[in-house]
Image (cartoon, coloured by chain):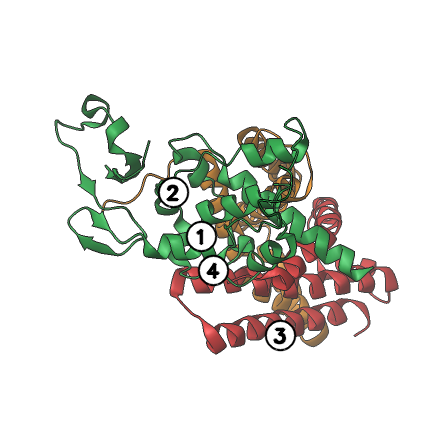
Amino acid sequence: MLNLPLYMAQRITALLMAPLVVGHLAVMIYAIQGGLDSAEILGRTQGSLVWFLFYGTFVIAVSIHGAIGLRSVAHEWSGLKGTLLELFMWLVGLALFLLGARAVWAVTYA
Amino acid sequence: MCGSCAMMVNGVPRWTCRTHMSKVLVNNAVMIEPLRNLPVIKDLVVDMDPFFDKWVAAEGVHHGALSREDPIASIDTSSDSRTQANAGIECINCSVCYSACDTVTANEDYLGPAALQRAWTLLNDVKDEGRKTILDAVSGSGGCHNCHSMGSCTVYCPNELDPMSAIAGLKRETAKRFFARRK
Amino acid sequence: MKAPARSHPLWFAYMLHRVSGVTLALFLPLHFWILSLAMTEPLRLDGFLLLTEAGAIKLAEFGLVFLLAVHLFGGLRLMAMEWLPWSASQKTLAAGATALSLLIAGLFLLRAI
């Protein structure tokens, strides 16, 4: 159920996220050494424009990418189609974006 | 090869005229069923209409501009585009790839590997004038972008063709056009 | 109808890519919600982070990192096949992508324990 615009959005956000995922994996592997606590995380991210932009971009990209991906799965594995399929995709995208944006805010400027 | 004998043998789409019983017997038994993904008319006979309808919908028809008055078009047989086209023209429309594909099963709009491969061969045919028409046809909701590259089409094609790569080519060309428009 | 034969490498790559994508998509809301606790209930966040010391959680994290790496490298393989003009041996690339993912996830686990 993918047409050219959806496919392009999917692929472009994928390419955008490639370096972001690598960065996220690197930070993770570094951060978990010696245990993990909120002070360590927030010490790094709080008030930081760089981390706000990094994870903010990540959230926008993953909301688009995940929504389109789940759209394909929903259509192929549950037969959802037409308006309901569109609605499903938009709801997934919106949910991921809202939850993600909230999380980014929580660790940067909240 | 005509492809009329294509059917599911132990769950695998094959040409039964090229299948040795000795190679497919399991505990001295073999299971044969009509081709997957097509409506069954009776017993092992399937209705090939949806397959051919999608062939046409993918613009798998020659878009010629020359008439009998024009000289014969000269083709560079060693060119990259001719090599790409040649890789797919031996398709005999047997529907084995169409039956092997899980995306065809799950997505009723999906044009399928055979139709899309034909569109790709025409796209690479310098005699074909329908470039825009073809690219539009394969960019709709049933188009090449639904392919998940699981590769069953290429694995099971009895003619050893490679529809998966043809579809990847279509994705590449449609993406190029998308970026070109943006400029 | 007997299930069609799907036991070929690229089909597994497709299924792994799909399963990893869906799992990550389902995990994300939980991940986002826990992180948001930094703003609303920071003590609860620390509670959750303490849980990550547990062996079972570390195993789950290894699984998630593996799925993330698999999805990334599998995706890059797909994009190379679709958008780059060269044709590479698909099966080798698929195997390579999975191996690299295991390596990265393994690195994560080793650092974590």
Left or right: B45, with C92 as reference point: left
Q: Secondary structure at mark 1?
A: helix
Q: Which mark is residue C73?
A: none
Which residue type does callout 3 highlight? Leu
Provide residue A40's location: percent of width, then percent of height.
Answer: 77, 56
Q: Is residue A36 visible?
A: no
- From the image, tell me which residue sits under label 4: A73
Residue at x 43%, y 40% (from the top left corner): B153
Output the letter for the chain in red: A
Name the residue carrying label 2: B93
Asked if both marks, 1 and 3, belong to the same chain, the answer given is no
Q: In the picture provided, is B160 more to the left or to the right than A44?
A: left
Asked if badge 4 and badge 3 are on a common chain, one would say yes
Question: Looking at the colours in the rendered structure, which chain would you say is drawn in orange?
Answer: C
Using residue A100 as the reference point, say whether residue B183 is left or right of it: right
Tell me residue A78's x, y (percent): 39, 65
Query: From mark 1 to mark 4, how far is it between C-alphas?
Result: 25 Å
What's the mark number on residue A94? 3
- Considering the numbered disc 4 on the image, is that residue within a helix, a strand or a loop? helix
Residue named by callout 1: B55
The residue sitting at 12% across, 27% down in the picture is B28
Q: What is the distance, in whole Å, between disc 2 and disc 3 at their CAs?
A: 43 Å
